[in-house]
Image: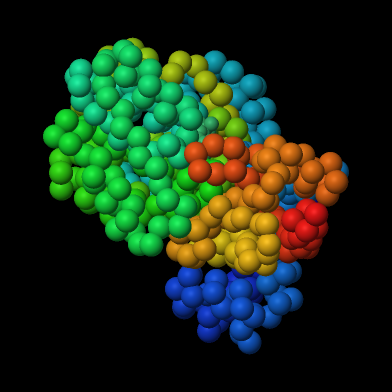
Amino acid sequence: MLGFKNHYLSIMLSKRQFLKSLFFSAALPLKIRRERLLKKLPPSWTTEAFDAYWLKIRSDYKLKTEYINLENGYFNMMSQPVMDAYFNDMRKVNLEASCYMRTVQFENKQKTKERLATLFGCSPNELIITRNTTESLDTIISGLNWNPGEEAIMAEQDYGSMLDMFKQNAKKYQIVNKIVSIPLNPKSDEEIVELYEKAITSRTRLLMICHMINSTGHILPVKKICDMAHEKGVEVMIDGAHAVAQFDFKISDLNCDYYGSSLHKWLGAPLGAGILYVNKDKIKNIWPLYGELGFGENDIKKLNHTGTHPVATDLAINHAIDYHNAIGIKRKEERLGYLQSYWTTKVRKIKNIIINTPAELKRSCAIANVGIKGIRPSELANILLKKYKIWTVAIDNANVQGVRITPSIYTTIDELDKLIAALKEIAAR
Ligand SMILES: Cc1ncc(COP(=O)(O)O)c(C=O)c1O
């Protein structure tokens, strides 16, 4: 096994060779590159360099041989170099024990936060490291000083825990929740913007939107929604559980007020790592969930007091960032989008197969959802696992009945070919 730093260097070096082979196409926008990739590898892409690079990445992962894991949306496992470094962090923290906790704990967390802020494009003074998206978004939903009768707008495709938190707040603070439903194949961004716009009234205070809908992989035009809402004086909170480190964007470009995400999904950090972004002008409006009077009302650290927590995770996030950066977000986004488009284009037109993910490339990346007429999602997931050894998750909710397919950067085309063959066989029954 190479040393930790050498290992990243070797990924970066092979990335450089890989990029060299892409010389002419690398300057093209991602969407066009993916379109070209789907049609046929262009001359400047050598298949060997392309495959070799991603097989090298795959070799960094320890995978079960009993099944093909196409459910990386819940938890995207750590690569072995990240996990080895994480174990070393745990050993260090355990050895230094309370001395670590009483000396460098917060300084180290701050350094990690600064790297995350650079990576995701915001000020460190607007970011905290949380345990997950749930903690991040619930901190906002429950931390706002709601007045009875105020309204919040959300979609039925939003994540259940956040919808539950709004329902709880409706009881606790007598707020009113308005629910919209997002079409699977919108004709334009404006159609979605209008959907939210029409739900806004003079009592609307907050809009919750998903950056990527978890059940379908549908990417929403979040910046346009934020711009529209702000014009009407409404704040926007984005659920970015699946967006961060899956595709390229900066939080500062979205014009949102609040943004929450989990780092154990697409950054490949250990379980129990997330972020919360709060626009600097909005921090004072949020009450901490756990009592904390040691910081000023404009200091985001007031929202970060959760008691003693697994601090080795704060350190391990750095290794996940290193691994992620060694690949590069553009390359990662392109690969993930390609993997999804590869299998969906091959089955989209097949009789009885329903793809519950927009066909337009800009509206999706790694995640897609597939249903088969006449087969319940749980049954389909069961058949895929029992007969074809493919691990997925059944989704049976708001306008979506199917299984969610989530490849990771270690997924191979060969694995997707097995999925395609399985779907064709099941659909032909
Ligand atoms: C859209 C969305 N929001 C929030 C969450 C909650 O994430 P976590 O359990 O990491 O808090 C998930 C989890 O899959 C999700 O898909």
Q: Which image quadrant for residue 258?
A: top left
Q: Is residue 297 above or below residue 187?
A: above
The answer to whether residue 86 is left or right of residue 425 is left
The answer to whether residue 114 is left or right of residue 318 is left
Residue at position x 33%, y 14% in the image = 171
Front in this rendered view, residue 149 or 231: 149
The answer to whether residue 119 is left or right of residue 291 is right
Whether residue 7 can be seen here: no
Front in this rendered view, residue 176 or 35: 176
Front in this rendered view, residue 127 or 103: 127
Residue 163's x, y, as percent? 42, 28
Whether residue 285 can be seen here: yes
Residue 33's x, y, as percent? 53, 75
Residue at position x 31%, y 32% in the image = 178
Residue 279's x, y, as percent? 26, 39
Residue at position x 54%, y 26% in the image = 311
